[in-house]
Amino acid sequence: MALPPANLSCQPLQLPPLSCPFPSEVSPYAERVDKETIVWAAGAGLLDGTEMLSRYRQARYGWLGARTYPYAAYHTLRLVTDWCVWLFAFDDVFCETDRHAAEIARALPQFVAVLDDLEAGQDDGQVENVFARALLELKGRVSRYGGADQVDRWRGVTKDYLFAQVWEAANRQDKVVPTFDDYILMRRRTGAMLTVFALIDVASGLRLTPQEWRHPDVRAITESANDVVVWDNDLISYPKERGAGNSVNNLVNVLARHRGCSFQEAMDEIGGMRNLAVGRMVGLGTSLAELGSEAVDAYVRGLEYWVSGSIDYSLSSPRYTTAWKGDGLRAG
């Protein structure tokens, strides 16, 4: 059922403390990759006009990759950072606009054709959508640096991400605030974190076996890390989304609407939720260390870097901080 628009308050909000017991590092390739990834995105046609190009340069997305994959070699850091920029641009162009769910759904066949190696998606000259063409090039790099099972894992979660955008677009279109349970389930897909987690062992060069990837504790720590990063993003990006069409797809709004609490109370509750998820990660990491697998240990470290790196990046990037200054949000 559609709910009436929220009564937005001008009262300054306080970002709850974002505890992070995990290490924080930066790749030595940060500056180089930051420049090159924007050149790549612009050349691929992902950035729509000079204003978007300027914003992306200022956002310094290379530093997100450098903080979340600080262990990666140069070529794989370029891959994972370019993929993150693809996701940001896709989100800005497709997912935070007034595009209808049907419009996004009609664009899906080109993406699926690329990911599933179908003939229609393998010739760059025949792929019309610029995002699908860039996806084809990125898939080629994932295949170059990863094994067949790693490619399959990435393509599967990427398709889940793309199809989940139709659900999110339907919420925007109909101004529907999803239920708490539906939101938690779907945010694990709309947030695209599984697509970047699937590249951790490609970036580290220590491949998880299919059995390790399916280990129940690996799945559990992946889910907890996913929750932490997307809930942190909902908190940090709330000023940017507050009052906009996509605000229905933010956990702050979901809690405020369905529980009848204030926005600040919702933010504080999310802070508690994410701290519990961080605690689960710590416990699961200890258990997984007992497996004695170098690849599993590297994967766990990669998840930890995503938590610490995304916080460090988001608290310093103009993509988010500009909105805080205009909305009165204060960091805890």
Image: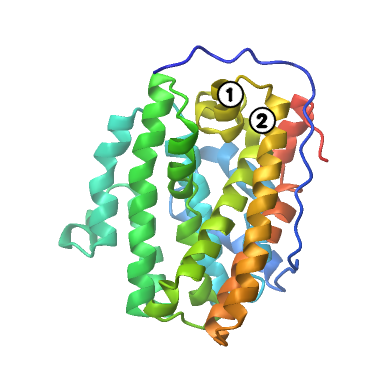
Q: Amino acid at mark 2?
A: Ala
Asked if residue 136 can be seen in this view, the reply is: no
Q: How many marks?
A: 2
Query: Which residue is at the front of the view, 137 or 313?
Result: 313
For mark 1, give the secondary structure.
Answer: helix
Counting from the top left corner in percent of width and height, residue 86 is at 48, 53
Q: Amino acid at mark 1?
A: Arg
Query: Which residue is at the front of the view, 288 or 18?
Result: 288
* Quadrant where the N terminus is found in the figure: top left
- Indicate left or right for 307 with 221 as reference: right
Counting from the top left corner in percent of width and height, residue 207 is at 47, 82
The residue at 55%/68% (across/down) is 78
Q: Which residue is mark 1?
A: 259
The residue at 43%/49% (across/down) is 189
Give the class, few, some or many, for how many residues have Cα within 10 Å of label 2's Cα (few <14, many ≥20). Answer: many
Q: Is residue 204 above or below residue 328?
A: below
Kindly report which numbered mark, 2 or 1, lies closer to the viewer in this rendering: 1
Q: Is residue 31 above or below residue 183?
A: below
Q: Which residue is mark 2?
A: 266
Please report contact status of discs 2 and 1: CB closer than 8 Å, yes or no: yes
The residue at 33%/54% (across/down) is 159
The residue at 50%/33% (across/down) is 180
Distance from the alpha carbon under mark 2 to that under mark 1: 9 Å
Counting from the top left corner in percent of width and height, residue 28 is at 72, 74
